[in-house]
Image (tube, grey):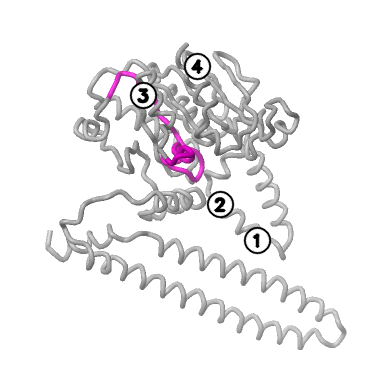
Amino acid sequence: MPFNAIREVKLRENRSGYYPVLKTGFQEATTRVQEIHQAIAGLSFQMLGWIPGLAGPVRLAQGTHDAIAGGIYATIRQGVGGALTVADLLEPHAVAAITTPTTPTEPPSRLAVGLRSALNAVVGDHLQHSANPLAIRMGFYASGHLIPLTPAGLAAHLPERSDRLCLFIHGLGCDEHSWQRNSATAGNAPSQDYGQRLQAELGYTPLYLRYNTGLTITDNGEQLAQQLQQLLAVYPQPVHELILIGHSMGGLVARSACQQAAAENLPWLNLTRMVICLGSPHQGAALEQLGHAVTAALHRSDMTAPLGKIANARSVGIKNLRYGLRAISPQPQAAPGLPGVALRFIGANLAKNADHPLGHILGDGLVTLGSATAPHLRGDVDAIKLGGLNHMALLNDPRVYQQIKKWLRV
């Protein structure tokens, strides 16, 4: 490949992907403002047109107004869009100018990863479909690095391996760092997360997944099913046990992966002993159900329809959360039970008393107790309620860990 072609590929790789997202977001926001402007102006002109003798002049004025306003909004969209396009083209040249081949490869900071994860939650489906480099690629991560699914990659990133694996799957808008969200003691000494403690106390090898939470739950479940299959194919020793622990959306993704593995007869499912869900909305997330109702209401009026379009622009991953278990399988009629796989649920209540009636309304602030504990499932199912915890606190709480440890010790 010629040098210039190689350089062009490198420049494309160095683009952050933020400018195209900003351009699309700005243009869509400008269009929604224009639609609101047109709806308000249209109503005003309509009312003036009802006055006898003004219908003709009003039509002329409205036509002039619409032409001028349309030109202004088009200029704004094109001007700012063009500036962002130029910035996107210039960015890799600036990166190339300050980067040398000897620069060590370091993972992005937690802040950068967190920002990217949040962006994927909101528009991750758009990022994926537009091949934007900000779209997160599903994989197992260690210390911020994607673990290559090769013997050498596993050896480099998982120096201490056992035949018992425990995979941690984060929730909407998060990443693998969320399991260390509150892992600092009062003395600022780092505390161990659930995975590290399970490794030290029960001999499990912890793995941490990062994925695009803006995609559908079934898409992520299918990807995870294949990723686990690839992992076990290159793992340097036979695996005798696999545990999946998912927080919020992560619990639904874990169950979706198991359902799809069952449908495809993937061998790793036979090794899966237990799926543990922390605050997962099995009966649907009430907040997203409310959001869907509000969006539908906004679309009923020409005045508020543009706001409804803005609200409806959220990712399919977010929209999926209102369905709960109905979103975990491509076949809605698929049975939610998995023979041979134990299901364990932990739900939280903001009130100190885990059985306080508010738990059935507010739950952990995002997921109600009934949705988190899935009380109507059959099979090897167990669920507990914990009081005085919010949704994110489930990621790093001593009581949650002790319950996980208790279940795994049996």
The residue that appears at 54% across and 30% down in the rendered structure is 278
Closer to the camera in the image, 381 or 59: 381
Q: CA distance from mark 4 to mark 3?
A: 14 Å
- Mark nearest the camera among 3 and 1 is 3
Label 4: how many residues lie within 10 Å, few (<14), some (14-19) or many (20+)? few
Please report contact status of discs 2 and 1: CB closer than 8 Å, yes or no.
Answer: no
Closer to the camera in the image, 115 or 265: 115
Residue lying at the far front in this picture: please name it: 187
The residue that appears at 26% across and 37% down in the rendered structure is 148
Label 1: how many residues lie within 10 Å, few (<14), some (14-19) or many (20+)? some
Q: CA distance from mark 2 to mark 3?
A: 38 Å
Q: Which residues are magenta?
A: 161-188
Of mark 2 and mark 3, the one earlier in the sequence is: 3
Residue type at mark 4 is Lys
Please report contact status of discs 4 and 3: CB closer than 8 Å, yes or no.
Answer: no
- Mark nearest the camera among 4 and 1 is 4
In x, y percent, where is residue 398?
52, 28
Q: CA distance from mark 4 to mark 1?
A: 48 Å
The residue that appears at 39% across and 49% down in the rendered structure is 110
Q: CA distance from mark 3 to mark 1?
A: 49 Å
Q: Is residue 63 left or right of residue 249?
A: right
Label 1 secondary element: helix
Which residue is denoted by mark 4 in the rendering?
A: 406
Which residue is denoted by mark 2 in the rendering?
A: 314
Residue 83 sits in which quadrant? bottom left
Residue type at mark 1 is Leu
Vertical arrangement, residue 172 with respect to residue 268, above or below? below
Which residue is denoted by mark 3 in the rendering?
A: 199
- Mark nearest the camera among 2 and 3 is 3
Which residue is denoted by mark 1 in the rendering?
A: 307
Q: Is residue 247 left or right of residue 261?
A: right
